Image (spheres, coloured by chain):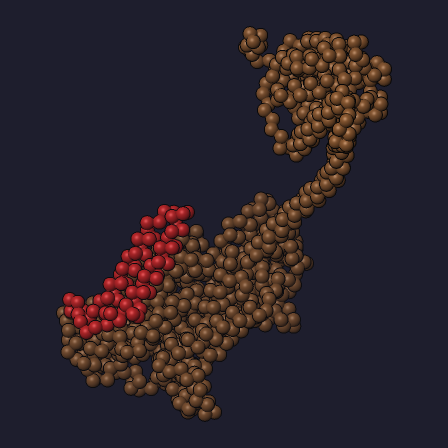
Amino acid sequence: MLQGWVIVTVSFAYLGVLFAIAYTGDQRAEAGRSIIANPYTYALSLAVYCTTWTFYGSVGRAASSGVGFLPVYLGPTLAVALWWYVLRKIIRISKAFRITSIADFVASRYGKSQLLGGLVTVIAVLGVIPYISLQLKAVSSSYTILRHYPQIVMPAKAEALPFVQDTALYIALILAAFTILFGTRHLDATERHEGLVAAIAFESVVKLLAFLAVGAYVTFGVYRGFGDIFQRAQELPPLRALTTVSGGGYGTWAFLTVLSMLSVMFLPRQFQISVVENVDENHLHKAIWLFPLYLLLINVFVLPVALGGLMLFSGAGVDADTFVLTVPMAQRKEGLALFAFIGGLSAGTGMVIVETIALSTMVCNDLVMPVLLRLDRLRVGQRGDVSRLLLAIRRLAIAGILLLGYVYFRVAGEAYALVAIGLISFAAVAQFAPAILGGIYWKGATRAGAIAGLSAGFAVWAYTLLLPSFAKSGWMPTGFLTAGPFGIALLRPQELFGLSGLDDISHALLWSLLANGGAYVGVSLIGAPSVAETTQAALFVDVFRHTHATGPSRIWRGTAPVGDLLPLVGRFIGPERAREAFLAHARRRGAERLEDLPADADLVHFAETQLAGAIGGASARVLVHSLVQEEPPGIAEVMDILDEASQVRAYSRELEQKSRELEAATAELRAANAQLQQLDRLKDDFMSTVTHELRTPLTSIRSFSEILLAEPGIAPAERERFLGIIVKEAERLTRLINQTLEMAKIESGSAEWRTSELAVDQVIQEAVEATGQLFREKEVALSLACSAPHPRARADRDRLIQVLINLLSNAVKFCAPRDGRVEVRLREVDDLLRIDVQDNGPGVRPGDQETIFQRFRQAADTVDGTSRGTGLGLAISRRIIEHFGGRLWVESEVGKGATFSFVLPREAPAPGATAAEAGR
Amino acid sequence: MRRSDRSGERLVATFVLGWVLLNYPVLSLFARPRTVGGVPLLYAWVFAVWVLVIVVMALVIESRRE
């Protein structure tokens, strides 16, 4: 027999086991031998996702909508595949900044905004408290049903219990005690509760086993396997529809999948378990496939139990939500029914405990603390030990939340508002998605954007889901549902702007997320983030970079001595714990004693992080601000950590480089321009000189030709003389033109050089032979002296001969006939070969010694009418010698002859080369 | 590190695969009044894909080298 006391005893025994596990977990954690530090516990604790709404409710949903219950579990299955990127990032961020709740996360991301933290808390509390009520109701109803065994009585039809006998109240109280005991034992900077997580993991095992036991019994005990159940269901038309998706069901299916994908991350309890209670980021990996496996297992028997129950209780008025309990009862399986009850109890308590802890942390850190800190009267910031106050606030919050849940349960009872609350809660927490997902990937998102988005989304959610649920519960007139508020049909909450064809959840999710996301993006884009927001944005979005590289403290510039910070932190987390934490920090930084800790930004950041764990990021910031002489982070520092900033700097560096290059190019251009102008001037000079030089021979050719033409009777001898002059002048003209062209070629660099290694003595010999006739004609003596053992140089043979001929013919030209003596000497001077051509002519005046090497400049006095040169010979010769890396100059005294000398770089003697030369 | 980088991509691909197979229009192909071994086709399909997705994710995760 299942009497009340049996059920109560078993329930308390179960709770006792939970206590024992939680206690052991905490003890082991303190001893440093964690029992939850493995991926399996982590994956199991994630299954807190499955509440009584799953345990009892799935069968109920399956009985009314067939496969429609599945998206709620398919969504998380798919979502975990993305956790590798998304949740891992959230965990990393939360660990880096000691984030302890979803409100804290949002507040921290947007510049540690207290307003946002409060907003998220309000949404979470309003959205989730009815969900807690649902758990109380489920546990209470299941107790009522079981108590009437062997009769099957629906709770709604059971006699109304007076307040003092209401099981739900006692459940709420017991759960509050349990949660307070294990959820708020002490204030911890990480806000982790190892014992509690161990208990939750255990509860996950119990509820899974219980459901599988019932499912297996119904499928294989009552019926003969899956095939049997489905086959029998096929024969009943109303059940046949349950195994397929009805008409517009695909939209609902997709919306529910998305909704549950978001919920499995953003429900406060899921955030608490998957992020805050996470021991090791790597546990996430195994959970990626273990958690979906759990979801699969707990769903395998849902449809068979639903169909089996529907067939068993056909028309008996048994609520499908109770099939998990009532089917075993109807089959007289007491033990199984009791196990099912314990399974439901574990599903309900697990959810309530974690959800309450998560909410109480949020209420304490993001609602109460900011208010207390603002009320200067209370002097919270200056009080002695605030950690007791904090714990008291949390405990009150836990009790308050559970009592609120209970009150809502009493008020709502069997109302629609409670039954439908599962998905309504999901839709409420889905509103966090834009702010969180946007916050970890989009640096441009601003606080104003997040506030606008959350507010808009929450408002639409309340209007399209919450109010209609109230109306359907009969708490409000339903007129505004059907006719719209003030008779405006377009504003009907469940067909907003005339959108119909969607179920109410999909409809609300669509509009609320549209409003939320639109406001979030729009407002973010219109405004600009503040320095604090930009800083946090960069730290969050680039968390993988920053946590590997330098800590976030480098943007902090505030300083405070350890003597100020330690008491502050001690007030909130307890003096002993604070001292331990500071000592550990000191050792990490290589300081032996606390007093040795430098009062720098790093210390301030450490203290703030410790405080953030206890009272939330936004409040911690306010507190530390009050204490620390903080300089606002300099723009340079903030910019330094920003990706955009480094890009900007890269651009500006590039720009600088470009402008430098541009300057260089400009300078080059200017130089080129100057050179061009110089060349232009030179060309003008050159042209005028050349024209002048050309005109002289032309004039004489022309005048002699005209004489010959005008006077035919001119004496033959005279005529011959004139023609001789004409020929000579023409030759000179040709030479002049050739040399001018050659000069131009050399100067423009387009002359062809056939450079090779030459035996210079042989070249001199050739030149001497070539000019031999001139010397013989004028009877000038020529002597050759070669004292170089290895006279080799790299040069163009023809050009070198040209130079030598030029010098030799000049020498002979200026020597007196018969008395003239010209000496050519070749010798080695260091690395150079020096060639002198000495004559005993009139010499060159010192003032002319340079000008004779210029074009068309000849020493005036040395000119005699008949033997004028072109005035280009020496200029060309000098260019040629300079081209070979040598030098050409003249030494002379007037009346004592002149010596034209040039030097060429000597080639190093190569072995064998001399012998070969000698053989020639 | 490279290998684990691939894990993320493989998981995203698994997500896409699961989403496509478990939503309209692919899903509608199996919403027919037929049975596979006594089990309605749609129900069998959803659970088969569910198992497939879990197996693929397990393979991706467990084949990753730390």
Q: Residue at x 55, y 7 (%)?
A: A919
Q: Residue at x 83, y 16 (%)?
A: A842
Horizontally, residue A199 falls left or right of residue A369, namely left
Query: Foreground: A348 or A237?
Result: A237
Residue A8 quadrant: bottom left
Of all chains in the rendering, the one displayed in brown is: A
Q: Position of residue A835 (x, y in %)?
A: 71, 15
Horizontally, residue A488 falls left or right of residue A715, namely left
Horizontally, residue A661 falls left or right of residue A39, namely right
In the figure, A780 relative to B39: above or below?
above
Query: Foreground: A14 or A744?
Result: A744
Query: Foreground: A40 or A382?
Result: A40
Of all chains in the rendering, the one displayed in red is: B
Q: Residue at x 36, y 73 (%)?
A: A255
In the figure, A691 relative to A566: above or below?
above
Q: Position of residue A80 (x, y in %)?
A: 37, 61
Residue A470 quadrant: bottom left
Residue A703 quadrant: top right
Q: Residue at x 32, y 56 (%)?
A: B57
Q: Position of residue A295 (x, y in %)?
A: 31, 65
State the quadrant of the N terminus of chain A. Answer: bottom left
